[in-house]
Image (tube, helix red, strand yellow):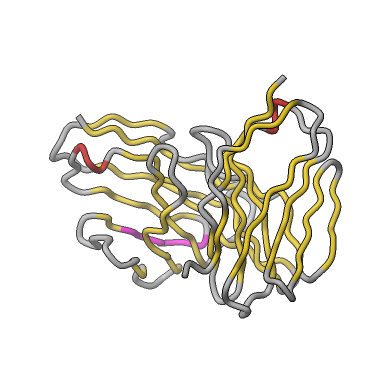
Amino acid sequence: QKEVEQDPGPLSVPEGAIVSLNCTYSNSAFQYFMWYRQYSRKGPELLMYTYSSGNKEDGRFTAQVDKSSKYISLFIRDSQPSDSATYLCAKYGQNFVFGPGTRLSVLP
Amino acid sequence: GAVVSQHPSWVICKSGTSVKIECRSLDFQATTMFWYRQFPKQSLMLMATSNEGSKATYEQGVEKDKFLINHASLTLSTLTVTSAHPEDSSFYICSARAVWDGSYEQYFGPGTRLTVT
């Protein structure tokens, strides 16, 4: 079983929709979690990180961690075509472990 | 915010030649840098972990004699692809680990697209 699993998509939503991106992890030895956004042919950029269970909000983005179910989520409100990218979740314990990424397309 | 640069952003080379890619942390010191490669529509694949002043740790299946990594300073790591072949054509991305108030964050460079003809 991979340490971090993520549905690769692709996921297509209409502009303005709420997007839910999810990851599961198998190893409880972690410190915190991160979400990265990667546009085509660009390096990933850090969107958000969170240390503990619960929600963390930053503008249209909300990161959620549920330690009991080993589930992490990223919600995007009022999605825009510019949000079209691949979203990678990652966890940090002794090292960084990345999920495979979910390709998101927001259609105008 | 922390910035990581890579140079060059795009390179074409002939089969059999060597190519060097630089990764720099511009406004912070990075004791650890990572090198990834990414094929089209695939996720990042960690190639090696580079610690300043010591030998890099390579992931299983990555040839250390082919992908030479040097981390000579706290702000610079280089990846040299030796005797490049067309199958080495890929997107190479570095990242640098920063430590802020006891927590770790990882910042990525913009990537280098290598095409071997």
Q: Is residue B4 above or below residue B70?
A: above
Q: Residue furthest bottom?
A: A29
**Residue A15 quadrant:** top right
Residue drawn at x 23%, y 32% as measured from the top left: B13
Count of labels in the image = 0
Q: Is residue A95 above or below residue A35?
A: below
Q: Is residue B19 magenta?
A: no
Q: Is residue A35 left or right of residue B41?
A: right
Q: Is residue B73 magenta?
A: yes
Query: Which x, y percent locates residue A91?
Result: 61, 65
Residue drawn at x 84%, y 66% as measured from the top left: A54
**Magenta stretch, residue numbers:** B69-74
Judge by depth and name the residue closer to the eye, B94 or A103. Answer: A103
Q: Is residue A66 left or right of residue B108?
A: right
Q: Is residue B106 left or right of residue B19?
A: right
Q: Residue furthest top?
A: A108
